Amino acid sequence: MSVVEAVGLRRTYHTTTGVLRRQAIEVEAVRGISFEIAKGELFGLLGPNGAGKTTTIKMLITLLLPTAGTARVLGLDVVADARLVRASIGYVFGGDRGLYERLSGLDNLRYFAELYGVDPREQRGRIGAVLDLVGLTGRERERVEGYSRGMRQRLHVARGLLHDPPVVFLDEPTIGVDPVGARELRATIAALTHVGKTVLLTTHYMFEADSLCDRVAVIANGHLVAQGTPRDLKARVADRTVVEIETFGVGDDAIGKLRAVPGVASVSVSERDHAQVISVQSAKGVELTQTLLGRLNGARVGRVAVREPTLEDAYVDLVTEA
Amino acid sequence: MPTGAAGLGPARVTRLLLAGWAFHLKSLSLSTFFILTSAIQPVIFASIAFYMFRAGGHAPTLLYAAIGAGLMGIWSTTLFGSGGSIQWQRYQGTLELLVAAPVPFVLVLVPLTLATATIGIYSLTATLLWGWLLFDIPLRIVHPLEFAVAVPATVVGLGLLGLVLASSFVLYRHANALANLLEYPVWLATGLLVPLSLLPGWTHPIAWALAPTWGVRAIREAALGGEPLPAILACVGLAAAYAVIGTVLLAHFERLARDRATLALT
């Protein structure tokens, strides 16, 4: 039996625009998505900003009512059995918010232990265990307002695991955390499935999804555009090669020219420090490097490399197609 | 095995209320802005009231004015606390966490509104001390036992009135703007500063439905001499009614907030 099951899940937001002449607007954030997560599985939900990842998670953890479709967690309906679902899940949102800043980490954990009905006789031991797990032992009596971003994120994880839930939802848990802290968090997340927990993770970081997830689903514009193991997704672009060109100050016109080169499957641009890294996918065996550099004539070019496609390339391909 | 949704017996409910109250009281007490607002604003009102009463030749009623000013502070704190702190929870991202807890939301919110009303005791203490130190108002309480009951009864009454208001603040992102509109009318309508007998008759039913009316009457009668018990009972009765209304409204508004996606800031 699936631990998490979404069937035709849909969510529409209603909002208004304008000051004097207000107009109603409907935004379809999630447009009928379906997936299942098995017990003990670490399932990744990937997608660009605004794709519908957080909306999906919020429906699953009962904070938003679906407009249509159904979702079940441990066989419980997220609308009809909301309170039972809440007792069985833990969730962690990325970012600085979601903590009582003026109070200590320990105060925060004690309060949520009460809310989640952790037996008073077990609270001390349970809080000690989660503090150990996230590496905050010794810092728990300090006020949260003095915590670094990484420490806050670890406190979020500790809060989410306090009541030892069998299902855990993690919404971009490593966002904004320094590399060492993020690596430690990833180790903590990986350890969750070792003790039998089922995890749904959303992330922007493809290497994170690749290294952690048993299966991933890609969501774009509210649609689920692909799902499978990271290996399955990478297989989509296995017949391709990627040319990576580091440039400085290249405009949209030049990117458009690259897209127009015959044989180019997709072009994506990412900012890295002061540089732009342009990744161009094309069929394996087709040599396009010189042609591409020719189209960038006049632009300042740094490092140029040809490499095998990664999960990120598969993701870019899927999201671009959507 | 998670136990959050199970076993909501009297012991668990009591623990939830007490732990939540202590937690939010500590959090609010560490807010310099909140404490200064609670302590300084009523002192300013009290000073104006003292001078007005003195100029009007009503020196013996200065304690009457001090208690009224203190209650004005408790009401402001409750109103500001209920509206402001729900908005603050929304801003700091904790409102969603509270809603997602596996207990009825009313048991999460009541401790918060009671804590804000409790902070209002600073207001009463500050105005009484201010009057004693600067205006030589003797702090002689005629019925100390009844006074000791009247103050917490008033705090509970105001706190649960705050719950009724807070239920709408959960649904509407900008409902705390309403809080500012309600501050002065309630001061007037409940006789905190001027006796109800000076107000038009049509305002009296409104006054009777509001806990501050009975709270200030109970505290004044306990402090200045009189029969505080009926006012205490009225305050407690209204608190019970507010608890029922607040519970029903909150369950409705919480579901609407999940439907309309207003729990988060955006």
Image (cartoon, rainbow, N blue to C red):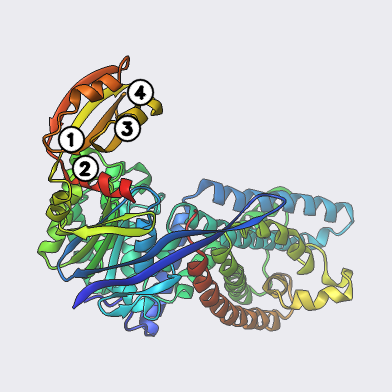
| Circle 3 chain | A
Does A303 appear above or below A23?
above
- Res. A61 visible in picture: no
Both marks 2 and 4 on one chain: yes
Q: Earlier in the sequence, mark 2 or mark 3?
A: 3
Are the two marked residues, 2 and 1, in contact with CB atoms closer than 8 angstroms? Answer: yes
| Circle 1 chain | A
Marks 1/3: CA–CA distance:
16 Å
Both marks 2 and 1 on one chain: yes
Marks 1/4: CA–CA distance:
19 Å
Are the two marked residues, 3 and 4, in contact with CB atoms closer than 8 angstroms? Answer: no
Q: Which residue corresponds to mark 1?
A: A242
Kind of element beneath mark 1: strand
Q: Which residue: 63% across, 61% down?
A: B79
Q: Which residue: 28% across, 47% down?
A: A204
Marks 2/4: CA–CA distance:
21 Å
Both marks 2 and 3 on one chain: yes
Q: Earlier in the sequence, mark 1 or mark 4?
A: 1
